[in-house]
Image: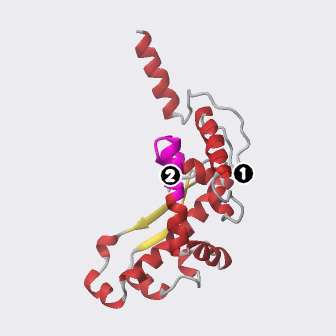
Amino acid sequence: VGMRVLLYLLLASWSRGMSLIPTTRLVLRGGFSSSDVPSIEQDLLLQFRGNLNKRKGGISGMNRDLLTDERLLRFLRNNDLNLKKAYDAYENMLARRNSLGLDKVTWQVKKSWKEDFWKMDCVPRRDLFRSYLCVEPNVGECDGDLVSFESTGQVKIREFMTKVSEPDVLTFYCYLMEWNMIKLAQLSKKSRKMSRM
């Protein structure tokens, strides 16, 4: 009977969006509340930050958007709260971003920011991509989360690929992903929770 009661309490609290895992009130950088971040994740976040401060070259000169608690928590959660895996994935991401020059893309997206991705002038070959792709990155918001839509099955792929190269497509998606990350950070700050997509 005790196990049934515990299971019921867990399910009931989960359905109301509550957590039975203890949380503390760590002040998270980026403006969102720590109330939905369990204590174990907050401890790991502090360790993650400590590891980053110890890395060769430290964190000076790094893109500050990549150092927010929201971004670091996403790495921890995407790597099953395994600190080593998250740190290795983070280092790989930094190397990849550096090789692709993505900080320049971030800067361009921020400089020409629009709530409507398709109205940003910085997106290379924007009008061509808009005419072929069925992508709506900001359909709306639901409970502080970003609602996007992409229907790749609608693309006339053979015709489309005669108009663009593979690097064109990769570049387009780099701009789209940077827009998504900036938008998610904005929503997290606005809703005071970790926004999802």
Q: Any magenta on residue 83?
A: yes
Farthest residue, direction left: 158
Q: Any magenta on residue 85?
A: yes
The numbered disc on residue 31 is 1
Marks 2/1: CA–CA distance: 26 Å
Q: Is the magenta stretch mostly helix, strand or loop?
A: helix
Residue at image location 65% in from the left, 56% down from the top: 67
Q: What element carries label 2?
A: helix
Whether 112 is drawn above or below 162: the answer is: above
Q: In front here: 7 or 166?
A: 166
Residue at image location 42% in from the left, 83% down from the top: 168
Q: In front here: 177 or 128?
A: 177
Farthest residue, direction front: 56
Q: Which of marks 2 and 1 is in front?
A: 2
Residue at image location 56% in from the left, 69% down from the top: 179
Whether 12 is drawn above or below 133: the answer is: above
The region drawn magenta spans 76-91
Q: Is residue 146 visible?
A: no
Report x, y in % for residue 47: 63, 41
- Rendered image quadrant of residue 105: bottom right
The numbered disc on residue 96 is none
Amino acid type, mark 2: Asp
Report x, y in % for residue 62: 67, 64
Report x, y in % for residue 41: 59, 38
N-term mark: 2 or 1:
1
